[in-house]
Image (cartoon, grey):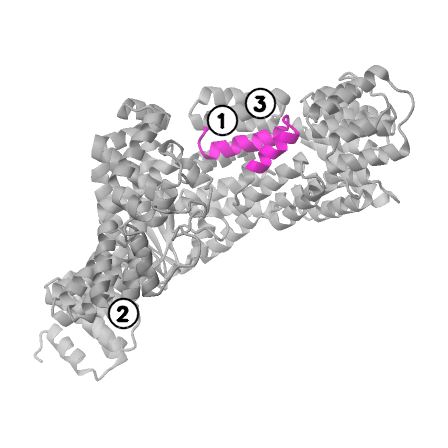
């Protein structure tokens, strides 16, 4: 198609047909252009009339035939065949980075009073802006206010020119963006079918963070012309804004129409950088620069490639190349800063953004990047001040607004200090969480210090936020993040246990995971790939507590066996650009297996050496070759062999007969799931090695009170998949069987085995504790209740009973801790709660603290006899 368009252009220049194209043909050519039938445009818009030349030139621009368009319109030095197409000659020259010749063409159009002279004028203003001549640019843009207010009637091109100029002015006066939108809408009404104003509307909405409206505008274009490159790229960018899949497909579709589309190649390069694929990113951006050597956006991404690779010499050269074109351009630094954030270089982002605002004090993006990343690095007051400045200049920015609203709530939090931490806890739960969080945080610090032989910068700021939405805003500036915690290095942020339902997650395990990241980032100077740090952090959870961390699941086994999980060398893709929603969660577990394998085969010292290698700027492939003696393909094959050998039984019992098409489906099968015993027994006879069929049959047999048969099936399911930690698993079935048969000890042991496979098994361990209490097994009950309050610290009855058990076991410190938490939970009888805390404090050798608590109990109940007796005892009197 592109060759056909170019051929028509050359043929017309050679033949120079004198007769203008028929009016009907031009109308059909315009309709063909709007519909993306570019070969029809070349055929219908024949001749050298300005209208025909414009249509052919626009078709060539849409398909990336920029040099053909330049030849069609008279050549780079001009003039064009008519003033009416000088503007389009300028557009073609701009696409090739030929700024001087483009400015001359725009000037000729304006001087000759061409029909689109206003479009040429605004493009001259944009050229001033691109060159860093901001004052001249804004002075020119200011003239469009009078144009809009004074002209009785403006064409669609004129209205688009006004809208473009006003959108630039909106950077200084944000309310003007509304006027720009109005002018674009009027342009769309004046030129029905023309994609340009609709794409511009989509771009403006996206720039002002309104993705739904931008989607609507782009879709209107794509409904008429599914191959329109600018609309395809716009839709890709809108999907990226949403965090939705499909971005790469759309960008590549844009390149199918226009292989010289610089914006699409820059977009793809940025996506490749996010997966830390520097070679592919460099290839895309270099191809963009072959088309337009002066593309500032492409130069910025090339600078980011060099920066993130650690090649500061090449970075400086590219930076200077861009600044030679525009010495005042802030977005070189903003782009590198934003991409540095994607690779967890938060302090670098602050410094880069500082350089951006030094170039342009109106770079609200720069002020925002600086403020957001100062918050991430623990500089709260300075970060807030810079965010306020950014929001004042860009009041449409939802990330800035949400973050500032959250910061306003920080006065509801309390700071607790320990030797290595400053911990921020919400006032409503600080007394509940403090004894646990201080203990586990310091334990994690010391255990990881010994394991890694180093320490991250201290104090570590740990923020435990009351709601998941607050955590999401603190992390990204917007709501909707499904994660539980994040590490910015020596700033950790996570959900409070109160942010989720009981048993939804184990917050102490999450804290340990984020602490592991602090070590990984410090040791690698924030160069560790995401997959490496995430997988290793899950491994560290299991090292700390065998029941913590992600477990093998049927979903992962099925996805891996079906080829839906990437190989080790491409595992980063699952975190950064997941192919299906569940892939990220499954990748956490798969990543942890990498380190099970490496540590078992090569030892933990090799893992530390990887982190040191990343600090030095080395790649995973290079490190695997030098440290493990494995090529990339051997690394992938070796890991695959390890996984398939380790989980051979589980693979055999969960993937036989699997339909691989429904990605992420837990059951992995299509069609209705049988629930009656006989149907399930038939399934088991047909697939005797099918774990899920066995488990469903065992569950159904318990429901039918056929306990002996249920035990047989549950034990067979357990043999097939001994590490299954999902809900209502074989151990749960066996616990139900034993309880029904009055075998309390066996039931309690089965529940303990189930909880050993699930870090958040609150209900399970509470049931175990109840059974062990009935059995008189105080030690077993104490251990089970400790597991319960570890994950869910808001159960007052569990704390009360655990305090009694600690006291009976002589653990006076544990009894004090639990009694303090009981008081913090504000039970109905606060006088008794404070009295019992006073008793625990006395037993722990803290008489003054005990006296304080007993007096507070007597304030509530002055006649409380036991409290009065304790007070006398504490004063040395007799009871």
Residue at 74% in and 20% down: 68
Q: Is residue 624 above or below residue 582?
A: above
Residue plotted at (87% across, 29% down): 113
User: Judging from the image, what secondary structure is the residue with disc 1 in?
Assistant: helix
Magenta residue span: 249-277
The location of residue 369, given as percent across then percent down, is 51, 40
Of mark 3 and mark 1, the one earlier in the sequence is 1
**Helix, strand or loop: magenta stretch:** helix
Q: Quadrant of the C terminus?
A: bottom left
Element at label 3: helix
Residue 55's image quarter? top right
Residue 287: assigned label: 3
Q: Residues within 10 Å of mark 3 (few under 14, many from 20)?
A: some
Apparent side of residue 705 relative to residue 566 in the rendered image (left or right): left
Q: Nearer the viewer, mark 2 or mark 3?
A: 3
Q: Are marks 2 and 1 in contact (CB under 8 Å)?
A: no
Report which residue position mark 2 lands on. Answer: 796
Most distant residue in the left direction = 878
From the viewer's perspective, is 485 left or right of 293?
left
> Can residue 645 be seen in the rendering of this structure?
yes
Relative to 664, is 268 above or below?
Answer: above
Tag 1 residue: 280
Residue at the outermost bottom position: 863
- The percent position of residue 574, horizontal first and vertical second, equals 42, 40
Image quadrant assignment for residue 90: top right
């Amino acid at each position: 198609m592109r060759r056909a368009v170019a051929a028509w252009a050359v043929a017309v220049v050679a033949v120079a047909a004198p007769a203008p194209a028929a009016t009907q043909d031009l109308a059909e050519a315009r309709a063909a252009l709007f519909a993306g039938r570019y070969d029809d445009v070349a055929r219908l818009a024949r001749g050298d009339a300005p209208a025909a030349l414009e249509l052919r030139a626009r078709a060539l621009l849409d398909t990336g035939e920029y040099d053909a368009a330049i030849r069609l319109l008279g050549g780079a030095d001009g003039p064009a065949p008519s003033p009416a197409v000088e503007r389009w000659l300028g557009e073609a020259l701009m696409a090739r980075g030929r700024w001087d010749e483009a400015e001359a063409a725009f000037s000729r159009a304006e001087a000759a009073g061409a029909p689109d002279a206003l479009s040429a004028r605004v493009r001259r203003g944009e050229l001033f802006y691109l060159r860093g001549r901001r004052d001249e640019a804004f002075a020119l843009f200011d003239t469009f206010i009078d144009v809009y207010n004074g002209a009785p009637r403006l064409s669609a091109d004129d209205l688009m020119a006004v809208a473009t100029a006003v959108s630039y002015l909106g950077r200084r006066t944000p309310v003007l963006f509304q006027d720009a939108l109005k002018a674009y809408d009027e342009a769309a009404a004046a030129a029905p079918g023309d994609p340009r104003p609709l794409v511009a509307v989509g771009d403006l909405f996206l720039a002002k963070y309104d993705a739904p409206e931008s989607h609507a505008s782009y879709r209107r274009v794509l409904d008429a012309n599914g191959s329109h490159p600018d609309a395809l790229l716009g839709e890709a960018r809108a999907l990226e804004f949403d965090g939705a899949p499909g971005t790469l497909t759309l960008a590549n579709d844009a390149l199918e129409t226009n292989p010289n589309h610089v914006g699409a190649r820059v977009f793809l390069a940025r996506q490749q950088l996010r997966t830390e694929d520097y070679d592919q990113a460099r290839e895309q951006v270099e191809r963009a620069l072959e088309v337009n050597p002066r593309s500032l956006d492409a130069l910025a991404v090339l600078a980011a490639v060099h920066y993130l690779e650690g090649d500061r010499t090449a970075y400086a050269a590219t930076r200077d190349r861009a600044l030679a074109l525009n010495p005042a351009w802030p977005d070189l630094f903003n782009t590198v800063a934003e991409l540095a954030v994607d690779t967890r270089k938060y302090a670098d982002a602050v410094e880069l953004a500082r350089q951006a605002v030094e170039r342009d004090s109106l770079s609200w993006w720069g002020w925002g990047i600086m403020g957001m990343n100062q918050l991430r690095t623990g500089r709260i007051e300075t970060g807030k001040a810079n965010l306020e400045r950014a929001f004042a200049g860009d009041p449409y920015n939802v990330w800035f607004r949400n973050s500032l609203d959250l910061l306003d709530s920080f006065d509801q939090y309390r700071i607790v200090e320990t030797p290595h931490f400053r911990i921020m806890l919400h006032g409503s739960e600080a007394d509940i969480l403090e004894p646990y969080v201080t203990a586990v945080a310091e334990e994690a610090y010391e255990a990881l210090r010994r394991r890694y032989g180093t320490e991250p910068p201290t104090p570590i700021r740990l923020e435990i936020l009351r709601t998941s939405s607050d955590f999401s805003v603190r992390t990204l500036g917007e709501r909707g993040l499904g994660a539980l915690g994040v590490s910015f290095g020596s700033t950790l942020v996570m959900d409070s246990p109160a942010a989720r339902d009981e048993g939804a997650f184990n917050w102490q395990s999450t804290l340990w995971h984020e602490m592991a990241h602090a070590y990984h980032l410090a040791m690698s100077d924030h160069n560790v790939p995401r997959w490496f740090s995430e997988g290793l952090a899950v491994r560290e959870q299991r090292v700390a507590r065998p029941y913590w961390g992600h477990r093998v699941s049927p979903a992962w086994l099925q996805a891996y066996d079906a080829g839906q999980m990437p190989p080790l060398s491409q595992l980063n893709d699952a975190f950064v650009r997941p192919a299906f929603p569940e892939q990220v969660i499954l990748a956490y577990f798969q990543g942890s297996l990498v380190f099970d394998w490496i540590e078992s085969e090569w030892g933990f010292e090799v893992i530390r050496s990887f982190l040191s290698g990343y600090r030095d700027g080395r790649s995973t492939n290079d490190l695997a070759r030098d440290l493990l003696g494995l090529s990339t393909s051997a690394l992938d094959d070796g890991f695959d062999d390890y996984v398939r050998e380790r989980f051979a039984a589980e693979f055999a019992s969960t993937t036989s007969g699997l339909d691989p098409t429904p990605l992420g489906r837990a059951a992995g099968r299509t069609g209705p799931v049988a629930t009656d015993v006989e149907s399930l027994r038939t399934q088991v006879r047909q697939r005797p090695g099918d774990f899920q069929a066995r488990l469903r049959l065992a569950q159904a047999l318990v429901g039918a009170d056929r306990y002996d048969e249920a035990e047989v099936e549950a034990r067979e399911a357990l043999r097939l998949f001994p590490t299954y930690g999902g809900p209502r698993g074989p151990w749960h079935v066996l616990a139900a069987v034993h309880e029904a048969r009055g075998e309390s000890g066996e039931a309690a042991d089965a529940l303990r085995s189930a909880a050993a496979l699930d870090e958040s098994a609150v209900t399970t361990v509470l049931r175990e504790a109840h059974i062990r209490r009935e059995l008189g097994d105080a030690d077993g009950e104490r251990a089970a209740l400790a597991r319960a309050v570890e994950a869910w610290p808001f159960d007052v009855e569990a704390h009360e009973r655990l305090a009694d058990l600690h006291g009976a076991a002589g653990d006076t410190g544990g009894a004090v801790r639990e009694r303090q938490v009981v008081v913090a939970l504000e039970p109905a009888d606060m006088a008794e709660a404070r009295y019992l805390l006073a008793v625990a404090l006395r037993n722990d050798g803290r008489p003054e603290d005990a006296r304080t608590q007993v007096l507070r109990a007597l304030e509530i109940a002055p006649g409380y006899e036991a409290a009065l007796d304790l007070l006398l005892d504490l004063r040395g009197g007799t009871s």
